[in-house]
C-alpha cells in the first residue's frame, strides 16, 4: 500500500488544560470520521490537530519553512556545512536529495506535511459544514478556520512548487493518489475566495486561553501576500489597509520588544504559534530517546551560538563562560543560522534595528561569528537547548505597512506611500532626518522598500519569496557574499521552485503529466 501523505490522516485530539495549553499536544488517538465529529469539542480538537502539523519541524518548527524562505537568499545562512539546508544554500537541489535527517525535515517532509493539512482539513469540512450536532455559530467558526488552514497549505505549496495537486473534497485515497497538478494561478484565485470566506467567519480576537489560533486577520494577511504575488496592487493595498485600519493590532515603539520571550502575543504580532518547553509528543517518535521535546521550539537553538565556536580569541573562552554563567546563560545552540556577510556589511550602522539583527560582541567579548539575537535565547533555566518555549512569530503588523507601501507605490508612485514605510522607519532611527523618506522617484522608492523589508524582517521567513516575486533572486544570489556555500556558481532560473520528491513521483506518475521536467529538475 502507498505510504506517502496520500495515505495518512493525522488528526490529533488535544486536551486544553491552561491558557498556555491550546497547542501543547496530548495526542490520544487517530480519528476516524465514522466515530468522530459527534460534538463541537470533537471538531475543535480536529482543528487543533492541524496546528500540531504546522508546528512540525518541516513547517514552522526548527528550521522548517525557513530552509526555503530564508536560506539561499541574502540574509541568513549556516556558519558551517549543514546537510539539511546544503541543497538550498548551494542550489544543488534535485529529486533524490529531497529528504534529510530521518525525513523529519527537508523538501520531502515539507511536501508531505502541507499535503496532510489539505487532506485533513477536507475531512473536517466534509464532517462539520452540515453537522447539526455542532451549534451553528461554532460550526461557522470551525469551517472558517479549516478554510484558512487549507488555504495556508496551498499558499505554501504553490509558493514552493508552483502547480500542485489540488482538491477541495473529501476524496478517497485512490482518487488523491492519482491526481495530477493544477495550475497555480487557478489555485490562488480559488483560495482567495476561501480566505475571504474564512475572514468573514473567523474570530476578530482570539481568547487568551486559546492563544496560538489564527484570527480573521491572519486570513486577510495571506490574502494580501497572494495579491502581491499576483501583482494585483489595488487589492493588495486595500487588504493591507483593511488590516491597518480595522484590526486591533498596533506597532510597538521598541523594535526589540516585539521579539522578547517575555512579551509574547504583543499588539504587533498578528499570528504566532504557541510553543512550550518540556512537552513531549508522538510526532517526535523518530527521535525517541533523544533530548528533544515535541512541543518545544527548536528554532532558538539554531540561531544561538555554540560555545566551541566562540569567542574570536579562544583564549577568552573561559572569560565568556564566566560572563554567561553570571547571567544564568549558556551558548549551547548550534550557530547554524547566522547573518550572512552581505547583511552584516550592508545593514545601516545608524539603524536601531541593527543590534537586534546583528551582534558581533557579547558583553565586551568579540565573537567569531555574527548572530541574530532577536531570534536566539541564551537563558539556561527557562530556555534550554532544543527545548525552548519561545513562540514562532509568523506575521506581524510592520510587514503589513510595508506591503501597503509597496502596493501604493506600484499603483500611484511614492507620494502616498511614504506614510506607510515611514511608519516602520521612524522607530528604526533616532531622528526624523534619518527615518523620513521624501523626494524619491517610483524606482528609487521601490528599491528603498526592498531594502526596508530586508532590514525590518530579517530572518523571519519572507526574504527569498520576496526576491522571487520581484524577479531578482538570481541577480541577488549572484552578487551576494556567502560564508560557506557559493550558490552563485550553481543557481539557475528553475531554482525559484523546488522539485517534487522522487518518492512522490514513484507513487503517482500523474504528477509528471503536465510537466515532465518536474519544474526543470529533469
Image (spheres, rainbow, N blue to C red):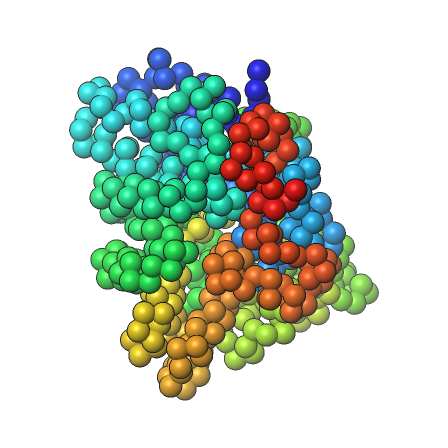
For this view, does 21 lie left or right of residue 459?
left
Q: How many marks?
A: 0
Residue at the far left: name it: 136
Q: Is residue 104 visible?
A: no
223 vs 318: above or below: above
* Spot occupied by residue 461 in the image (x, y as percentages of width and height): 51, 54
Identified at 44% across, 38% down, the residue is 182
For this view, does 330 lie left or right of residue 297?
right
Identified at 41% across, 68% down, the residue is 254
Query: In the rendered view of the protein, which quadrant contains the N terminus?
Result: top right
452 vs 120: above or below: below
Query: In the rendered view of the protein, which quadrant contains the C terminus?
Result: top right
255 vs 148: above or below: below
Residue at the far right: name it: 315
* Spot occupied by residue 45 in the image (x, y as percentages of width and height): 36, 27
Identified at 35% across, 72% down, the residue is 409
* Spot occupied by residue 511 in the image (x, y as percentages of width and height): 54, 33
* Spot occupied by residue 431 in the image (x, y as percentages of width and height): 41, 83
Identified at 46% across, 20% down, the residue is 173
Considering depth in this image, is 183 or 13 the residue closer to the camera?
183
Q: Is residue 450 visible?
A: yes
Image quadrant where residue 23 sits? top left
Considering depth in this image, is 231 or 88 the residue closer to the camera?
231
Amino acid at each position: 500500500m502507498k505510504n506517502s501523505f496520500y495515505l495518512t490522516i493525522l488528526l490529533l485530539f488535544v486536551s486544553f488544560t491552561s491558557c498556555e495549553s491550546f497547542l501543547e499536544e496530548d495526542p490520544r488517538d487517530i480519528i476516524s470520521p465514522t466515530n468522530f465529529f459527534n460534538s463541537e469539542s470533537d471538531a475543535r480538537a480536529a482543528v487543533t490537530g492541524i496546528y500540531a502539523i504546522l508546528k512540525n519541524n518541516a513547517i514552522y518548527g526548527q528550521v522548517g519553512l525557513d530552509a526555503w524562505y530564508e536560506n539561499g537568499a541574502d540574509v541568513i545562512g549556516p556558519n558551517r556545512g549543514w546537510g539539511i539546508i546544503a541543497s538550498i544554500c548551494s542550489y544543488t537541489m534535485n529529486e533524490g536529495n529531497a529528504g534529510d535527517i530521518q525525513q523529519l525535515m527537508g523538501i520531502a517532509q515539507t511536501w508531505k506535511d502541507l499535503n496532510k493539512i489539505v487532506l485533513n482539513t477536507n475531512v473536517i469540512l466534509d464532517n462539520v459544514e452540515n453537522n447539526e450536532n455542532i451549534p451553528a455559530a461554532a460550526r461557522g467558526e470551525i469551517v472558517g478556520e479549516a478554510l484558512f488552514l487549507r488555504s495556508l497549505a496551498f499558499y505554501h505549496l504553490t509558493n514552493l512548487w508552483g502547480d500542485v495537486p489540488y482538491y477541495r473534497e473529501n476524496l478517497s485515497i485512490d482518487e488523491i493518489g492519482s491526481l495530477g497538478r493544477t495550475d497555480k494561478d487557478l489555485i490562488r484565485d480559488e483560495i482567495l475566495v476561501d480566505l475571504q470566506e474564512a475572514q468573514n467567519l473567523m474570530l476578530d480576537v482570539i481568547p487568551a486561553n486559546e492563544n496560538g489560533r489564527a484570527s480573521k486577520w491572519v486570513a486577510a494577511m495571506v490574502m494580501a501576500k497572494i495579491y502581491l504575488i499576483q501583482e494585483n496592487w489595488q487589492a493588495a493595498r486595500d487588504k493591507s489597509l483593511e488590516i491597518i485600519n480595522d484590526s486591533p493590532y498596533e506597532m510597538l515603539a521598541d523594535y526589540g520588544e516585539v521579539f522578547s520571550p517575555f512579551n509574547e502575543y504583543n499588539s504587533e504580532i498578528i499570528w504566532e504559534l504557541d510553543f512550550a518547553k518540556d512537552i513531549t509528543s508522538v510526532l517526535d517518535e523518530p527521535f525517541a530517546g533523544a533530548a528533544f521535546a515535541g512541543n518545544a521550539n527548536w528554532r532558538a537553538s539554531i540561531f544561538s551560538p555554540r560555545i566551541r565556536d566562540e569567542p574570536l580569541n579562544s583564549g577568552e573562552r573561559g572569560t565568556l563562560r564566566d560572563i554567561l554563567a553570571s547571567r544564568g546563560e549558556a551558548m549551547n545552540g548550534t550557530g547554524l543560522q547566522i547573518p550572512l556577510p552581505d547583511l552584516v556589511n550592508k545593514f545601516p550602522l545608524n539603524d536601531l534595528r541593527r543590534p537586534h539583527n546583528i551582534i558581533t560582541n557579547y558583553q565586551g567579548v568579540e565573537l567569531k561569528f555574527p548572530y541574530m539575537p532577536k531570534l536566539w535565547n541564551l537563558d539556561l533555566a527557562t530556555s534550554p537547548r532544543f527545548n525552548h518555549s519561545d513562540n514562532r512569530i509568523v506575521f506581524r503588523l510592520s510587514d503589513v505597512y510595508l506591503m501597503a507601501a509597496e502596493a501604493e507605490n506600484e499603483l500611484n508612485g511614492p507620494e502616498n506611500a511614504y506614510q506607510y514605510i515611514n511608519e516602520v522607519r521612524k522607530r528604526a532611527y533616532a531622528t526624523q532626518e534619518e527615518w523620513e523618506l521624501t523626494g524619491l522617484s517610483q524606482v528609487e522608492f521601490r528599491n528603498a522598500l526592498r531594502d526596508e523589508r530586508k532590514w525590518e524582517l530579517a530572518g523571519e521567513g519572507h526574504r527569498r519569496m520576496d526576491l522571487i516575486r520581484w524577479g531578482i533572486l538570481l541577480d541577488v544570489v549572484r552578487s551576494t557574499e556567502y560564508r560557506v556555500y557559493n550558490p552563485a556558481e550553481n543557481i539557475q532560473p528553475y531554482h525559484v521552485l523546488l522539485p517534487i520528491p522522487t518518492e512522490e513521483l514513484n507513487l503517482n506518475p500523474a504528477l509528471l503529466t503536465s510537466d515532465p521536467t518536474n519544474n526543470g529538475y529533469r
